Amino acid sequence: MSREQKAVERARKAFLTGRSQSLEYRINQLKNLLRFVRERQKEIAEGLKKDLRRSECGTPLYETLGLESEINLAVRNLKEWAAPRPVSKSMMTISDQVYIQPEPLGLVLVIGAWNYPWAVTIGPLIGAIAAGNAAVIKPSEVSSHTSKVMEDFLPLYLDKELYPVVTGGVTETQELLKQRFDHIFYTGNGTVAKIIMEAAAKHLTPTTLELGGKSPCYIDKNCELDVACRRIAWGKYLNCGQTCIAPDYILCDPSMQDRVIQEIKKNIKDFYTEDPKKCLDYGRIINERHFKRLMGLLEGSTIAVGGENDESECYIGPTILKDVKPDAKVMQEEIFGPLLPILTVSSADEAIKFINEREKPLALYIFSSEDKLIKRMIAETSSGGVVANDCLMHFSVSSLPFGGVGNSGMGCYHGKHGFDNLSHLRGCLIKKLKMENVNKMRYPPHTADKIGWARFFMLKHIDFGSLGRMAMLALMVIFVAVIVQRYYTD
Amino acid sequence: MSREQQAVQQARKAFLTARSKPLDYRIKQLQNLKRFIKEKTTDITNAMRKDLHKTANATQLFEILGLEGEINLAVSKLAEWAAPRPVNKNLLTIADDVYIQPEPLGVVLIIGAWNYPIAVTLQPLVGAIAAGNAAVVKPSEVSSHTAKVMELLPLYLDPEMYQVVTGGVPETQELLKQRFDHIFYTGNSTVGKLVMEAAARHLTPVTLELGGKSPCYIDKNCDIRIACRRITWGKYMNCGQTCIAPDYILCESSIQDKVINEIQKCIQEFYTNDPKSFADYGRIINQRHFKRIMALVEGSTVAIGGDSDESECYIAPTVLRDVTSGSKVMQEEIFGPILPIITINGLKEAIEFINEREKPLALYVFSPSKKVIKQMISETSSGAIVANDCLVHFTISDLPFGGIGNSGTGCYHGKYSFDQLSHLRSCLIKKLNMEGVNQMRYPPHTTEKLRWARILLLKQVNLARWSQVAQVAVLAALAAFVVQRFLRR
């Protein structure tokens, strides 16, 4: 039996003991996970520094603070999330118990990515634990130092049978994908995602695929360009552009291009100094392969800012390309690096057309002071998420479902969505063995007047919700009237 | 270009005109769909009679009524379902617009089944239309007469937006090569895997409404008479060809005889002494399934029924007793009027038996004891669970109808149909002011900035609770004011 098979079997066996069913157990595990994140900041930061040249403060800011927040949210709300959810009654079910019971799925496979390895590997794990599942965690081998930290330390904090960490590369992942899971949660690219979904299909395993794409960033003529460009510069060059929701490219009017370039250049200097290579807060490309890939994308486009690079350090400076054409190399794939192409469009209409000719992105960014324009762009395009007048921030709003659509993915997570996505929401109808007469209308022989009754019961809609509210209001009015009468007429 | 390719292309072209975006359009199409089922009732019931030996009244009761209910619900609730859904804010987004916007996915492929062809083909279509999608509807070729009636849909619905493509395996395979934004399949798990595999090539999400062996546990302390009445109804409706039919019974041997007696009484009451000549008793859909089902009886003891007539695809309401877990009838979903009874020693053994098998689409437990019901729910898993009745959860629009594991993925009915076939897009609308607050996120990253970020990200303020408290305070103040002003004389 392979190592992967063993881990999967042990996790399933552990799940079948039923110990992850109790909320106490899950909260305990989540609290342990929180302890891990807090106590091992040093090891986590060291791993990230070696993998991505992440700065000391970058670790909590962009990886672990978000996890802490999600864990706290899950711990605080678990009882509510896991409780039976009553549904509105109808005339047919007026004396029955009707509700939705969230239940664990079983065994979840979490395949992480390398760009924010903690956020995108542990983030889904929080939902898996909260929902009562067992989980096999397969961190990305590309962020190898972080992967080692997960392998060495997670088992010291979490139930190591229920949540095994399985490290490895393509071979190990393929071996994992042969096993049967109850859900597969994958973060990465579309090519591998298709392979994963195909493997999942053999077991009818549902999947959550957090993918990517080219997230467009439209800058309207009517906007405060200095603020807009500041936010865009931050969103783009964070983690050296290796962010699934980074603004991939800019669309703006030709008359604005120069100013946009100027403003972004100003902010690059502000954030990363005159020499980003020496600045601790500026990252590196994850490895040589991606470095070469990115340098290849520059071909054929005009560099307006940056372009400096150093292969020995996998360093590429914050770069802006101007007057980029739609068929340029840099526009043929998700950049995932610190290259920011600007394409000029003469109107919002043209921008919308451009966006819609392409695959649905994970994020869409619109910078404008005009509400109407923002609303129109939202209505006429589609994307995983959309943010007006900022970048990336929807990632940190736990009440927003984070996920893609079309080529950018399926399913979502964060907050309660993470819990629901990794639960089975089971329909429950509890009736009693009486009132049998009511059922006569459904039994054979099926006559026309039985249908009449069935029609009445099934099609007549009584909004019990608003009836109830009206009744309460009436009661309150009566109560007040009684009090008023009692105490004020003397 | 194949016929299937053309249909998909036309549907996509129609979708891209954006005419299905306005709610008015969708409501109109839904109302047209309703007109279709009302005006073509006779065609539909005739077709069902030919396909499944269903009476007109049974078709009304078990297919048309449910569909009508779903259409009515969608029409009356569409504005609410399609509206932006505000979500809880955090401290960072307190001044922003934060909501979820439901949007159409694009072109949805709906592959129907033959057992309740109208219900399982057109109910998903209601969700697809309501959510603003285009759809390609592929009715099951097995219920061929009903498929023919569905070809009339283009007379009522926008014929470009909602295509009907009939055909068998080759046509379905051709359809599955095309790119869709969602595939909704009802049928068996073998084909379900093929559908999901095809969908994977385009990263198309799927809803798979499959089946399985839905267990039916009868507690010895329950009112066996009423329990058996409901089970008999649930089992033999449509000749057992219901995805959520109670597949087999689990009970203690001490009540097996009583169960058999009661079921026999009910069979007689519902279907008379001669179900074969009774109009409200159906037929097996075709010879292939007839042979399959008859073979399942092999090796088991027939307690009731067992007679059949291949020329009519007729199988009598049948009960098998003392069935063993290794018998043929326990190896696959029966989908026919054969009801095996397996004896076990109590609830614990029943739960073990159920858990050794694939998660079913439905689980039925008959018991007067809340404790027993609770235990069954918490120690098993299934698409849905019903205590003390069969099938009826299908008609509750507020319950998500779907499977888990081998019984399926995704769900529908009511708002679930709408949500399943929508993209729930996160929207965060900020303004280009208050830039000062953002300082803490920009490089250079300092510990001081980090401290602020910690506070803003980790401090949980229950804004919803605060606003509730604020509202109550305002009401109380108002009440006090009114009391003081107008009632002091």
Image: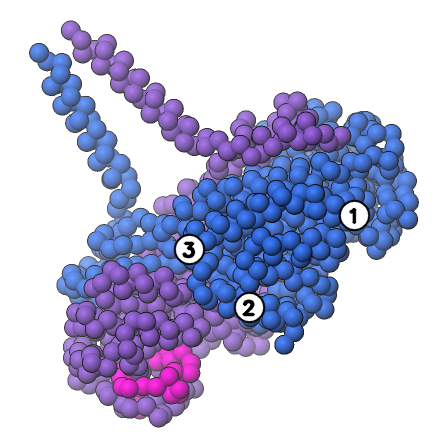
In three-dimensional space, the C-alpha distance between marks 2 and 1, rounded to whole angstroms, equals: 32 Å
Residue pictured at 57% horizontal, 45% vertical: A35
Quadrant the N terminus of chain B occupies: bottom right
Q: Secondary structure at mark 2?
A: helix
Residue pictured at 56% horizontal, 40% vertical: A69
Whole-percent x, y for residue A213 in the image = 70, 50
Residue pictured at 52% horizontal, 71% vertical: B192
Q: Secondary structure at mark 3?
A: loop
Which span of residues is magenta-colored? B308-336
**Residue pointed to by mark 2:** A10
Chain coloured purple in this rendering: B
Residue pictured at 86% horizontal, 44% vertical: A315
Q: Is B253 positioned to the left or the right of A14 in the image?
A: left
Q: Decide which of tag 3 and tag 1 comes sooner along the chain.
A: 3
Have a look at marks 2 and 1 and say if they share a chain: yes
Under mark 1, the amino acid is Lys
Q: Is residue B312 magenta?
A: yes
Quadrant the C terminus of chain B occupies: top left
**Residue pointed to by mark 1:** A50
Colouring chosen for the image of the structure: by chain
Under mark 2, the amino acid is Arg
Q: Secondary structure at mark 1?
A: helix
